[in-house]
Image (tube, helix red, strand yellow):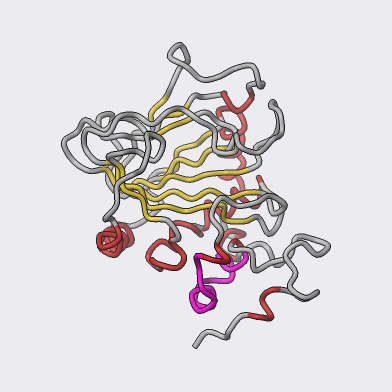
Amino acid sequence: GFTYSEEAAAVDQDMLDEQHAALMRDGYIILEDLVPRETLDALRVAARPWLDKMGRNSFEGERTQRIYGLPAKLREADPFIEHPLVLAHLNRLLQPNYLLSQAQVINIMSDSPAQPLHMDDGFYPWPRPRPALSVATVFAIDDFTRNNGATVAVPGSHLWGEDRVAGPGDKIVQAIMPAGSCILFLGNLWHGGGENRSGADRLAITAQYCEPWLRTQENYFLSVPPESVAKVSENIRRMLGYSIHPPFMGMVNGMHPKRLLPVAD
């Protein structure tokens, strides 16, 4: 079907089976060395001018800088949002024409405390245990270390019911991984940003993808102008909501939304 990119279809299926089994068991997988140094450096340079505001609360992080609305601002973010291995996993986990729920560049500065443990899809009012309604990636632009705020996760917590909340007694793992690697996890897994006590910033890019019948966290129809939508790949355009969830969710005047886009030069 037209929802699968050719690159995603070319991913080794045996490797994918193995990774998928680990993901279903633990709620997360770490995929090392997915992105080359040049792609990391290009994002780092392009992001710098946008990193000018601190978080407004303890969840955003008062010593954390975030760039929202990436598809309108940084084409250098696209290779992370549509990495072929990530898409291959999403094609297994979510229904066709799944959406980009949000994407951010996150700079955790030194002396930033740990983020509270949370689930990404916890705000959807559907009691647990239940399937994940979203899937997230966090790519390390800088090496993720024990001391610089590497993402922490509670293995197996995606299987918990409503009555259980992650806390100090639970086993946690930290996504310690080299730059260019990614932790991919289910939206119902308890996780959070780690504490940065390294003396240096820690840069990452994260994306969340959700089922095509759910509301996204970022409103891309307002934050990404049609001119930007015309410049992105077919994959990202679909994720921004220029797609249909059968029979007609997402239509405009009874038509496919793509028919209203300006043609890219």
Return the residue nearer the eye: 31 or 15.
Answer: 31
Magenta segment:
223-238
* Relative horizontal placement of residue 143, taking residue 154 as reference (left or right): left
Left or right side of 75 for 264: right
Write down the quadrant of residue 120 in the picture.
top right
For residue 256, which quarter of the picture? bottom right
In this rendered view, identify the residue nearer to me: 219 or 129: 219
Residue 233 position in % (x across, y down): 53, 71
Residue 102 x, y percent position in the rendering: 51, 52
The residue sitting at 51% across, 24% down in the picture is: 155
Residue at 26% in and 33% down: 196
Could you tell whether 226 is left or right of 70 in the image?
right
In the picture as drawn, the residue positioned furthest to the left comes out as 199
Q: Is residue 143 above or below residue 265?
A: above
Q: Quadrant of residue 123?
A: top right
Quick check: is 159 in the magenta stretch?
no
In the orientation shown, which residue stands out farthest toward the bottom?
265
Instruction: Name, please, the residue furthest toward the front.
Output: 56
Q: Is residue 229 above or below residue 111?
A: below
Residue at image location 60% in from the left, 52% down from the top: 216
Furthest-top residue in this view: 169
Q: Is residue 224 magenta?
A: yes
Classified by dominant secondary structure, the portion drawn in magenta counts as: helix
